[in-house]
Amino acid sequence: MNALGFDLITPMVSWGTGGNSIVPTMTVPTWSAIVGLMGAALGIARDDAALTGLANDYALAVRVDQRGVTNADYHTVQSPSANQARAIRPRSRAQELDYIDDLNTTITRREYVHDAKYRLFVVQVAPSPAIALTALIDALRAPVYPLYAGRRSCIIGRLDAKLVTREEVQTASHWDQRIALDKPFAMVTERRDLLVGSRAFGIRHECVA
């Protein structure tokens, strides 16, 4: 088994699963967040198809060492109506605020997890991935762009990624069903967090010990 591993220990994370005014968080990292993190480390743009390649060539296993505590914050957000946004198609937040006079103000609720500790394993599932495992390790140790634990407010530094053995991956408490582990699991859940296109999501299956 070809895999890398690293510890993710940070004061605050947010593994969002969608939503607008209310954005909940999972207590376990989502694959889309980790794909985005690896893409940032490699210097890949968000709309680059290489992110989909990463999601298909690798899979995620997670050992939750400390679940942490879930909290929420509230703040106001200004945004145009859906019709205005479609008509103007702003390319940035600055353009959105400059070009649109009639903005709607809403209160949003965003969830975060504090004081969580994870051991993450990224496992190669493709015979010949477009981006080699060693390149991922180098990028996580010296990232091109800043790394975030789900949201930009949850910034983290470089990650001490290393090659790991099958035995280490076997310690995972949650793992993608594409990873063949000789380990019993209590349930299989559906997770809508696998990148399948430009900023889009699909269903993957995750085993939970």
Image (spheres, rainbow, N blue to C red):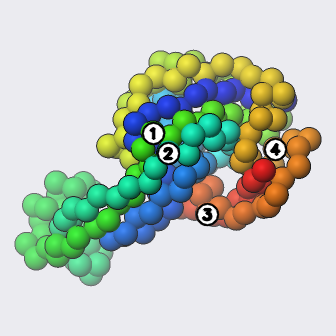
Q: CA distance from mark 1 to mark 3?
A: 25 Å
Q: Residue at x 50, y 45 (%)?
A: 68
The location of residue 122, given as percent across then percent down, is 68, 35
Circles 1 and 2 in contact, beta carbons < 8 Å: yes
Q: Secondary structure at mark 3?
A: strand
Residue type at mark 4: give it.
Answer: Ile
Between disc 1 and disc 4, whose residue precedes?
A: 1
Q: CA distance from mark 4 to mark 3?
A: 17 Å
Between disc 1 and disc 3, whose residue precedes?
A: 1
The location of residue 90, given as percent across then percent down, is 24, 62
- Asked if one can make out residue 54 in the rendered structure from this viewpoint, the answer is no
- Rendered-image quadrant of the N terminus: top right
Q: Secondary structure at mark 1?
A: strand
Residue type at mark 1: give it.
Answer: Asp
**Few, some or many C-alpha atoms within 10 Å of disc 3 (few <14, some 14-19, many ≥20)?**
some
Residue picked out by circle 4:
179
Q: Nearer the viewer, mark 1 or mark 3?
A: 1
What's the mark number on residue 115? 1
Query: In the depicted view, which residue is nearer to us: 44 or 16?
Result: 16
What's the mark number on residue 68? 2
Answer with the quarter of the image where residue 130 lies.
Answer: top right
